[in-house]
Amino acid sequence: MKKLINITLLAALFLGVNSINAQKGKKKKKQKQKKVQVDPTAKIDLQNLPFPTGGKDWEIDYSKNWESLQKREIPEWMIDAKFGVYTHWGVYSVPAKGGPDYVNEMYMVHDKDDRKGVKKYHRENYGTEAEFGYKDFIPMFTADKFDANEWAGIMKGAGAKFGGICVVHHDGFCLWDSKATRWNSKNMGPKRDVFGEISTAVRKQDMKVLATFHHARTFGYAIDRKHYKEYTNYQKENWDLFDPKYADFYRNDFTEKQESFGNEWFLKVREVMDQYKPDMLWFDGLSGAMIKGMLPEERVINMFNDFYKQGKNNVISNKLPGSGVWNFPRGVGIRCYEGGRDMEPNPKGYWLVDRAISYPWSWVKNKSYRDKEDFHIRTIIDVVSRGGVYLLSLTPKGDGSISEQEQKIMKGIGTWMNTNGEAIFETRKWRTHGSGQANIVQVKFDKELVWWDFRRIQDKEVRYTRKKDNSAVYAIVTGWKENGSILLKELKSKEKFAKKGIKDIVMLGVDEKLKWKRTNEGITIDYPSTKPGEHAYTFKIIPNGELIDFDRE
């Protein structure tokens, strides 16, 4: 039997005080852990770190019925896709301050805890919490400029092979025509079946459909988790957070029982499954809710089995959240690492990295874009060379429009993909991911934390991919060397590449014949006189005969 971490601690990690009753339970005495002592001058051996990486598996007994789900292979379309796009958009996009956690921030007990300035902003622009509650943004969420076909076109134009939206975030407002809750976009706000329109538009673009669910954390999410016992009588009497009329929206122990929330959670997911038949489901914060009993484990398993019955090529994402514990037992679905956080230095198999086009996760006023298309292109290259799939979230404005900055970034990615997509889509790992000087994998020994800093990928990096039919190996090089050459050290003449060697080498997007020479040091290739774009360039290495030792796993 496999195990998951202590019940009380994990519930707290995932749900905070999502259940206030959890706070009444007896806590296990926390043992003080010794910090890992490391010589700061020593070279870090990423393959032999003094602590485990890649997330923790469950530490409590879990159902054997997960085993059938663990046996399901990741569908080929997902491994081929390499790039997907979705959105974080909802009621929280209207005030456009702080991010998707606006509802949690505005109902903090104390003003001193207003870390993002949401409470101050709210009062200055809309009134006090007693005068204007979070629910009062819903009539303002009219989405006048929302165009599902435009969104799907932007996704497709960037090269995405699957697309969708966050259908419900932690605030609990649903972006589909729901019978399970009145708090949905067909009944309120836009008065439109948003996901219905998106799923139709995405399929028109010949992309697979993704639905992401974040509502396992809704129960108690709006409550101040650290100070829930300190709410004043005035706050309880005047804030809509505590009004029984809105118990089915704000979901907390002050106004309702967990059981009703859990039942509704299942109804919502099944509605989306049955009404829109998405190809992929992605979840946030599930294991904590299952361990707490809010979402019975067997019901989750049965629902997932029904999802796979709907389509043999359907896929479920298994996210590694901030707690460091997988949503589901290892082996269920395709692994997903948020921004590369806690991802092991040498991830095996196939997996996802998800991140926002620019943080925070949703639209905010005066949003800045530190990471432009060059960052996302280089990240895609690196992720794919290691076996990953890049899942990028857009952050549309409250009115449903997508900012010019985000459209520009997406167009930039698409322009690069138009030339180099052959080296990305329908590829597999080669014998090595590549080489270069970028120290992408970062380690904090005192916190036993590994994270991936893709911003460190600059010029002079080489990444390799392999066409899944073994017809070519691609060397993707960041940066351009005018009138120069490059040495690919991974292709020394003494190392076998294909049964009859190399047939030819070309650069994607260039008709000019390349000069190249293979020696014991590697292959030296002269850059062509024509520069086919920006950011990164692809040398297509065509084998003569069958490839040899091509799969490093």
Image (cartoon, rainbow, N blue to C red):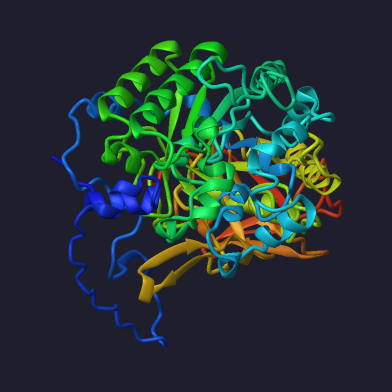
Q: Position of residue 428 (x, y in %)?
A: 50, 38
Describe residue 45's horizontal placement relative to residue 452 as left or right: left
Name the image quarter holding residue 160: top right
Up-down: is 192 above or below 100?
above
For the C terminus, the image quarter is: top left
Describe residue 254's horizontal placement relative to residue 481 as left or right: left
Q: How many marks?
A: 0
Q: Position of residue 511 (x, y in %)?
A: 82, 40
Q: Position of residue 519 (x, y in %)?
A: 56, 61
Could you say which is closer to the camera, residue 219 or residue 419? 219
Could you say which is closer to the camera, residue 282 or residue 497? 282
Name the image quarter holding residue 138: top right
Q: Residue at x 64, y 43 (%)?
A: 134
Up-down: is 87 above or below 17?
above
Could you say which is closer to the camera, residue 488 or residue 416? 416
Could you say which is closer to the camera, residue 131 or residue 531? 131
Q: Residue at x 28, y 70 (%)?
A: 50
Is residue 470 among the parts visible in the rendering? no
Is residue 105 among the parts visible in the rendering? yes
Q: Position of residue 306 (x, y in %)?
A: 37, 15
For the N terminus, the image quarter is: top left
Up-down: is 215 above or below 223?
above
Describe residue 39's horizontal placement relative to residue 421 as left or right: left
Q: Residue at x 74, y 47 (%)?
A: 95
Describe residue 461's horizontal placement relative to residue 223 as left or right: right
Q: Residue at x 30, y 36 (%)?
A: 290
